[in-house]
Amino acid sequence: MALKKKNLVLHIGLPKTGTTALESGFFPKYSGYAGRFYGLGPNGAAVQQNYFIFTRLQEIYLQFSGALPPSGSGWRDDLSHWVDELVFAEAGLLIISTEALSSWSRGPSMIWPVHYESPEPLGNHPIMFFLSEIRDLLPQNINLTTIVTLRNQSDFLGSLAAQERRERYFDSTNFDRLASHGDAFLDFSYSSSNSR
């Protein structure tokens, strides 16, 4: 007898791409939503029940990336147990949304690339390998769909500047790196075209 197909949807929201709006007004409408939430909404009980799945995935990614010390069993074993513990809604849907998976580790913390003067990204973003590990661990009856939200870079930079207080942002080297040095690490178009 064939197992019922299930869908695991991972939404990786880059900063300033409407992630909070999706997490507060759209995703909670689905009983299979696991992630940050603002109020309980119509499926509050389901959201609370799935919240552990969301927080555990973030912890494992932080261990994988080196931002948190490894657990006793290691991130791969933790990820395997996480897959085994997935709980799907009746419709066979589980949605996880987080900005944390878009961060690039710089040692003891996860940061947005624009917050540091000299990021040293090499190769693909770490999430690419992490997603392939999840895909390989999933049973055949679970489909993995990944949604990455991007934003026009000039709008992104303006929104980030407004959020962080204009004087702090434009007096820092962050903006100068983009304007004067053409730092490709801030170029979403370049980043996304090289991560396929």
Image: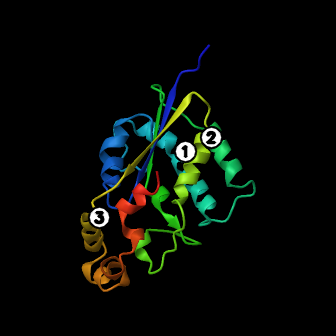
> Which residue lies under the disc numbered 3?
153
- Could you tell which of marks 3 and 1 lies nearer the N-terminus? 1
- List x then y, in percent, for residue 25: 30, 45
Going by the numbered disc 3, the residue's amino acid type is Gln
Q: Is residue 164 above or below residue 73?
A: below
Q: Residues within 10 Å of mark 3 (few under 14, many from 20)?
A: few
- Could you tell which of marks 2 and 3 lies nearer the N-terminus? 2
- List x then y, in percent, for residue 29: 34, 37
Q: Which label belongs to residue 136?
A: 2
| Viewer-side label of 2, 1 | 2
Going by the numbered disc 1, the residue's amino acid type is Ile
Q: Which label belongs to residue 53?
A: 1
Query: Answer yes or no: do the residues labelled 2 and 1 have beta carbons within 8 Å?
Result: no
Residue at the image position 47 percent from the left and 25 percent from the top: 90
Specify the quadrant of the image occupied by residue 27. top left
How far apart are the two marked residues, 2 and 1, measured between alpha carbons? 18 Å
